[in-house]
Amino acid sequence: MKIACIGAGYVGGPTMAMVALKCPEIEVVVVDINEERIKAWNSEKLPIYEPGLFEVVKECRGRNLFFSTDTKKHVGEADIVFVSVNTPTKTHGIGAGRAADLTYWEGAARLIASVSSSSKIVVEKSTVPVKTAEAIGKVLKRNCLNPDVNFEILSNPEFLAEGTAMEDLKHPDRVLIGGADTPSGQKAIQTLAEVYAHWIPRERILTANLWSAELAKLTANAFLAQRISSINAISALCEATGADVSQVAHAIGTDSRIGGKFLNASVGFGGSCFQKDILNLCYVCESVGLKEVADYWGQVVSMNDYQKQRFVERVIGAMFNTVSGKKIAVYGFAFKKDTGDTRETPAIDVCKGLIRDGAKCCIYDPEVKAEQIFRDLSAPKFEWDRPNYSRSQSHMLENVQVQSDPVAAADGAHAICVLTEWDEFKKYDFAALYEKMVKPAFIFDGRNILDHAKLREIGFITYALGKPLDPFLVKGY
Ligand code: NAI
C-alpha cells in the first residue's frame, strides 16, 4: 500500500511520521508545494518543533517515509491520499472573516483528479465545514479523465494538540473515520481503520457518517475553546470581587460532570484552529438559518478578544495609564509552551495593543524565530494561514525588538509580561531581573505560572490573572 499526504505542515508531517513508524510495510510520502518546507523536513532541522518528532522522523525517513515536492508522481501512485492543507478563514468576498476558504483544498482535489489513473481513497484530514466532502466529490469526479477511476471520500479529522502531538498520535483518545453509507464507503472506512489498527485498539477507532465526522471536529474545538472562554470570563469576575480563579477552577473541576482539564485561566486561547473553526461553525449555522446558534458560539471568540484586550488595559492602567516610550519585556510568543507555533497567539494582539499605546516590546521566546515574530506583528489578520505568508511593511515593527536572551530583554524594562507558559520562566532568577529593571518594576503574569508571593517579596508589583489584585493595581490607589 502507498499513502500520499498533501500538505507537510503541523498535521501532515507528524501524523504521517507516526503512520510510517507504526506501519513499516506502507510507503508514506508527504508532499507540499512549499519547497523550503520539504527541504527542512529532509534536513536535521525540521520545519516544526514537537517533542519526540525528530526521533520518529529520523527512524523512518528514507525507509518508508519520504518528503517530496513531486506532488503529481506521489499522489498519482498512492492508494490513499490524505489532504492536510490549510483551510484558512476567508479574507474577502462573501463570508469574509468567518467562512472557511477552501481554495487550497479544492486545488488539492483538482490535482488528485488530474493525476489519478487508479481508484483512490481521499481522506479529509484538514478541518473543513460540514458537507465539504460533497463538494470535493464533485470536483474529483468532474476533473478526472479516466471514467473507471473511483474516489471514495473519508473524513478523518485530526484531534492532536500541538506540543503533545506525538503522544496524542501514539495514544489517541479516539480516531474518527466518517464515510458514505454505501458498500464502497464502508469498505474504504475499513481500509483506513486497518492502517490505524496497527497501533490503536479497535474500540478507539470510531466510525460515523461523513457529515457527523466533519461536524464532530468543529464541535470538539468549539467545546474546548468554550471552556477556556468560560473560565476566562470568570477570571474577570474574580479580579472584581477578590475571588481567586485557581481556587474556583479547582472547586468546580472536582465535580466529575465538569472535570478538571482545560480550566486554566489565561490571557486567551490561540493556535491555528480554535478561532478559525468557531468562526467557520458560526458561518455554517448562519448559512442554514440558525442565527441564535451562531451568536451563541460567536460569543466564545468575543470573550477571547475581550480577555486579550482586558490584559492590555490592565498593563497600561497599572503603569499610570501610559506605556509610551516604555520598554516592556515580553516572555513567550508561542501560543502555548512546547511549540514554536505562533498562529493566532494571544501575544500578537497583546503586543499590538501595547505598541499602539507607544510601548516598546522586547520579545523573548525559546522557540520562536525573530523573523516569525516580525511576520506576525506586521501581517494583516488571517493572512498567516496562507502558504506564501511573509513579512509586510508595518510601523508596528519600529517598536519591536526580539531578544535571544531573557535577561537582556528585561534589562532597562519597566515591566515583564508573561504570555506563554514555558517551564523555563519559572526557574528564572527574578531577584536579579528586578535589579536590572526600572522601578517600580511590574510583572503581569498572563499564564499564572510564577510564584507571585515571592515576586512581591522581591519588590515587583505583580498582576496575576484572575487573582486578588495588589493594592497598587486597584483603581484610585
Ligand atoms: P500548515 O499550514 O502547517 O500546513 C499546510 C501545508 O499545506 C502547507 O505547508 C502548505 O504549503 C501546504 N499546501 C497548501 N496547498 C497545497 C497544495 N495544493 N499542494 C500541496 N501542498 C499544499 O497547516 P496545519 O496546521 O498542518 O493544518 C492543516 C489542516 O489541519 C487545517 O485545516 C487545520 O485546521 C487542521 N488541523 C490543524 C491542527 C493543528 O494543530 N495545527 C490540528 C487539527 C487539524
Image: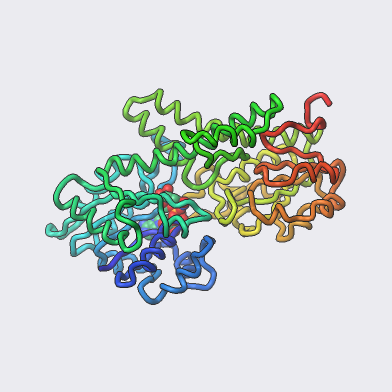
Q: Of residues 163 and 372, which is closer to you in this image?
A: 163
Q: Is residue 468 visible?
A: yes
Instruction: Examine the image and state in which quarter residue 279 appears.
Output: top left
- Residue lying at 63% horizontally and 48% vertically, measured from the top left: 420
- Colouring used for the render: rainbow
Left or right: where 105 falls relative to 134? right
- Residue lying at 24% horizontally and 49% vertically, measured from the top left: 139
Instruction: Examine the image and state in which quarter residue 475 appears.
Output: top right
Image location (x, y in percent) of residue 419: 65, 46
Q: Of residues 161 and 385, which is closer to you in this image?
A: 161
Image location (x, y in percent) of residue 216: 35, 41
Image location (x, y in percent) of residue 274: 48, 42
Q: Of residues 256 and 460, which is closer to you in this image?
A: 256
- Residue lying at 37% horizontally and 28% vertically, measured from the top left: 286
Q: Residue furthest left?
A: 148
- Residue lying at 44% horizontally and 61% vertically, measured from the top left: 14
